[in-house]
Amino acid sequence: MLFKKISLLALAILMVVSLVGCGEEDEEVVATVNGEELLRKDFEGVLNHTKEMYEMYGMEIDEDDDEMMEMIEEQAINELITETLLLQEAENEGITVDEEVVEQQIEAIEEEFETEEEMEEMLAMANLDADDLENEIRDSIKIEELVDTLVDEDELEVTDEELEEIYEEQMAMQQGQEGIDEEELPELEEMKPQLEEMAKQQKMQKRTGTVIEELREDSDIEILL
């Protein structure tokens, strides 16, 4: 699956938006996508999450580096636009969400907290209420279901040559790490299930990327930053 488990994604959403304050500037329109307005508060949430991701990979964020910040802001606004395009396409395709699944995901999130009070505190920190959380989860499921429809099963077939290529890439990465005994590296057959899943993920991502490019080309997008 291209996207993470919905419960984890929803928790990530909570962490992202909790970094965003409330104020009049939050209602500023930073972009429009086919007439739909994207607000600064949503952009700032994605921006903060993008910064965190860079920092996780060891990149130091210099807020005074205009070139760096321009790059990060461009990535953030494009991610927000992509999410909007996918939700619009899901709507166009008539994709609906099973409310029982939404409820299951809410229950999964609740299980991540020791008490109901802790969850309520997290929601309050994120400037969300129960309805907001439910909507975030519903949107996440819509996108996941849309992505699942983008690729036919035939397109996900993995050849032996593709498996061999991915295997060699993985082994090259392993051999480059300190403390790795080459004799202990697994054979291709041992890794075949994982390699097949990786290959399918790559095909899914490639197909999804193509669809996103097509959606952008066919859409009226204006960035106002």
Image (cartoon, rainbow, N blue to C red):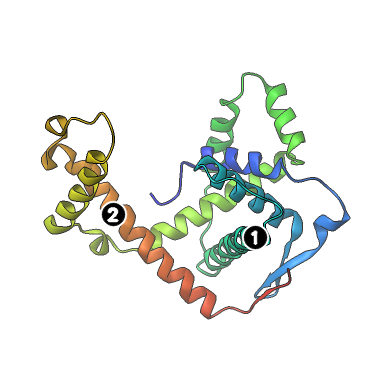
- Number of numbered callouts drawn: 2
SS at circle 2: helix
Residues 144 and 211: in front is 211
Nearest to the eye among marks 2 and 1: give it. 1
Coordinates of residue 79 in the picture (x, y in percent): 57, 60
Apparent side of residue 5 relative to residue 158 in the rendered image (left or right): right
Q: Residue at x 75, y 35 (%)?
A: 125
172 or 113, which is in the foreground?
172
| 162 and 74: which is toward the camera | 74
Neighbours of disc 2 within 10 Å: few (<14), some (14-19), many (20+): some
Q: Residues within 10 Å of mark 1 (few under 14, many from 20)?
A: many
183 lies left or right of 204: left
Is residue 128 shown above or below 166? above
Identify which amino acid the numbered label 1 is placed on: Glu
Q: In the rendering, at what x and y percent does residue 29 appear?
A: 77, 66
> In which quarter of the view is residue 32 placed?
bottom right
User: Which is more N-terminal, label 1 or label 2?
Assistant: 1
In the image, taking residue 40 as reference, residue 49 lies left or right, namely: left
Q: Residue furthest right?
A: 24
| Distance Cα–Cα, label 2 vs label 1 | 30 Å
Please give the name of the residue rendered at 17% of the width and 43% of the height, measured from the top-left corner.
192
Residue 9, above or below 47:
above
Residue 84: give x, y in percent of width and height. Answer: 60, 63
Q: Identify the residue shown where x is 70% and y is 69%.
A: 31
Quick one: SS at disc 1? Answer: helix
Q: Which mark is residue 200?
A: 2
Quadrant showing the C terminus: bottom right
- Examine the image and state in which quarter residue 184 appears: top left
User: Which sits in the foreground, 133 or 84?
Assistant: 84
* Residue underneath mark 1: 73
Q: Which mark is residue 93?
A: none
The residue type indicated by label 2 comes to Lys
